[in-house]
Image (cartoon, rainbow, N blue to C red):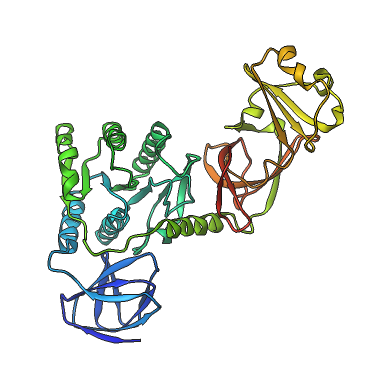
Amino acid sequence: MPVVKMKKDEMLKIFGPASVQIISGEVEVLGKKFTESSRFIVHKTRSYIVRALMDSELDFTLAPNAQIQGVEENDPYLKWFSKAREIIDRKYEVIVVVGGVDSGKSSFSILLSNLALEKGFSPSIIDADVGQADIGPPCFISMAYPSEQVIWMRFLEPVKMKFIGDIKPQNNVSNIICKIKELMETALRNDKKPVIIDTDGWINDSHALLYKAKLLLELKPDALVVLGKELYPYFKRFTKLGINIVNLGVPENRKTRNREERRMLRSDKYKEFLYDAPLRKVKLDDVLVINMPLFLGEEISIDELEVEPKDKVLYASKTCDTLYLVLSNPVRLQGFDQLRTRFNVSRTRTLISGFENRIYVSIVDQNNDEYPGLIEKIDFINKTIYYRCKFDVKPQAIKFSKIKLTEDFQEQLME
């Protein structure tokens, strides 16, 4: 537990996991001030720069692998701070932050929010990273209205969440842009300005740049913060839309997260929203089931199938090209080979009861607000869906994802 004395304007970089107690003086982290007797935690996947606002004394509790380092002369933190203050002083209403993986997008977004709160503004933050979500759970675009300063976006509570259903943005570009715009417009209507939009780190190929270009064309923000000097040439042309471009460097010495740490962070978020969630139920006839073709087709009477043993068939439906069967257990049905011809479909799809257990879903209420849920089971005989959700809302729709969660909240991709 080293005790460190800092002179006014001195800076230190802390790599977690660590706890920092302010013995005397005053310091700031991402614009949030800490005074005598206050403390803050540095998560093992995080690093922060601590800047002394006056002569100060700090008590560090360092876990294994934690470090205290000096700040390099070329570190962009002070430039970040001055540019963030300039952005807030100019009262831009919509600010988009782009950059690569682990470039500091979330940290810069929090810095903007903290400085806005210091000015007496009422900011909003949209967390648009479906894979490394901090405000809401994975697979969601989430928005928070910060009422106090924080140093990590994970300390914020979501006020609205929009389901994408995937942890990768690549196949969901249009939907992501639509949901970001929807949340942005909600924030502006509620006078929660500036609206700070923290994007994902997918930016290293032409498809990613096309996605970010479409996003900017749709949102038309007042300011675009580009983290990474090498990215500026790709975005400088957006000044033609009246967007103010702010290009900033990325710290060379910073905490980066490996794949396992990213999985762990997602698992923690799933647990936060789903662990010990109450079991709820809804009738299939009372809810719209989305993203599950089984429930998009016309329901077929079991007798109409003309298969044996028919008591093994729990549910059947037909779309224009596929006949779906849900069986109580794996069994070879007599008459199965004739089903495609009889129902004029190109294929049959067989599911075994229990396939639905622990599928990750969104529960959509009457106001079109969305909440994370987990399917427990579907009773096909009584046509009832049992699901877990911490939010007590009346479902209007249930949106399925292709993700199942294990008992310890690890992801498994469904076929």
**Between residues 61 and 384, which one lies in front from this camera angle?**
61
Residue drawn at (17%, 76%) of the image? 10
Would you identify the image quadrant in which residue 35 lies?
A: bottom left
Residue drawn at (80%, 35%) of the image? 382
Q: Quadrant of the N terminus?
A: bottom left
Above or below: residue 116 compared with residue 338:
below
Q: Position of residue 221 (x, y in %)?
A: 25, 39
Residue drawn at (62%, 16%) of the image? 320
Above or below: residue 230 compared with residue 305:
below
Would you identify the image quadrant in which residue 183 lies?
A: top left
Q: Quadrant of the C terminus?
A: top right
**Between residues 203 and 237, which one lies in front from this camera angle?**
203
Q: Is residue 300 left or right of residue 249?
A: right
**Between residues 31 and 318, which one lies in front from this camera angle?**
318
Q: Is residue 139 left or right of residue 212?
A: right
Q: Position of residue 290 (x, y in %)?
A: 58, 32
Q: Is residue 82 left or right of residue 114?
A: left
Q: Position of residue 130 (x, y in %)?
A: 43, 46
Residue that sits furthest to the left in the current view: 73
**Between residues 43 and 94, which one lies in front from this camera angle?**
43
Above or below: residue 2 compared with residue 295:
below
How many tags in the picture?
Answer: 0
Q: Position of residue 137 (x, y in %)?
A: 49, 51
Would you identify the image quadrant in which residue 49 lies?
A: bottom left
